Image (tube, rainbow, N blue to C red):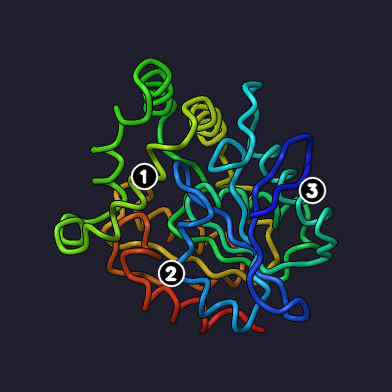
Amino acid sequence: MPTLQANGINVNYQIDGADSAPVLMLSNSLGTNLHMWDKQVPALSKRFRVVRYDTRGHGKTDAPTAPFNVATLGQDALALMDALKLTKVRFCGLSMGGMIGMWLARHAPERIEQLVLSNTAAKFGLPDVWNTRIATVRASGMKAITNAVIERWFTKEFREKSPKDVEPITQMLHTTKPEGYAGNCAAIRDVDQRWTIGEIETPTLVIGGKQDPATPFEAAELIAKRIPGAKLVALDAAHLSNIEQPEAYAKALDGFLKG
């Protein structure tokens, strides 16, 4: 997969689909990488030029130690778009990716044609939770948080029934750079978009997991309520709903995205 310089870092990305197709940009969750979208890309790339990338600090993208925030992550996405000469995209982000999507739709609305906010929140919990997680991964590495994270990402039934689907995601978490993960935890800790998302005018789909303990369905309902005209879809899944319910997820995207 290629890399390029965007906003001062090397960004790893992958493109699937015809060059002439409308562009759909996919943004990963905290602790994963662009391969979290593997189940969606074969179908999506028939209609779209699918551009997915490793968020700063994840996968093969650089993990600078300097502090950063949601604006930095949003500027990374815009710089990648500029480098690839993408004037406008449809943007789908899950969890942290959704956080980035909300920022983009507010600060660069002319670049976002449609927006999908999946298993995300306008504000992610209390600072102490994130500070504890940051301290843990810095002191003990990524495996110290694995069990707790995987339990939030997938329902018990799915973990027991589909270990072959859970294992690659576990490996993504294990191979995420601790400093990159910690930096993104701090960016998530410090963001609060609960009121500013009311400014978003981009057509928006909000996807929530009915069994998601990381970003509860109430968080999806709040986003859908605050963004004018937003559509809300509930899936019977935990946090990584695109992996736990790929068919239902694809149906939701297909019914919303135009291409």
Of residues 244 and 223, the one drawn nearer to the viewer in this rendering: 244
The quarter of the picture where residue 174 lies is top left
The residue that mark 3 highlights is 79
User: 10 Å neighbourhood of mark 3: few (<14), some, or many (≥20)?
Assistant: many
Q: Which amino acid, by three-letter code, is at mark 3?
A: Ala
Answer with left or right where residue 198 lies relative to residue 32. Answer: right
Q: Which amino acid, by three-letter code, is at mark 2?
A: Lys
Q: Label 2 vs label 3: CA separation?
A: 26 Å
Of residues 206 and 249, the one drawn nearer to the viewer in this rendering: 249
Q: What residue is rendered at 47% in x and 53% in y? A: 120
State which mark lies toward you, 1 or 2: 1
Q: Quadrant of the N terminus?
A: bottom right
Q: Label 1 vs label 2: CA separation?
A: 16 Å
Q: What residue is rendered at 73% in x and 67% in y? A: 89
Of residues 46 and 133, the one drawn nearer to the viewer in this rendering: 46
Q: Quadrant of the C terminus?
A: bottom right
Q: Which amino acid, by three-letter code, is at mark 1?
A: Gln
The residue that mark 2 highlights is 39
The answer to whether the residues at label 1 and label 2 have Cβ atoms under 8 Å apart is no
Which disc is residue 171 wearing? 1
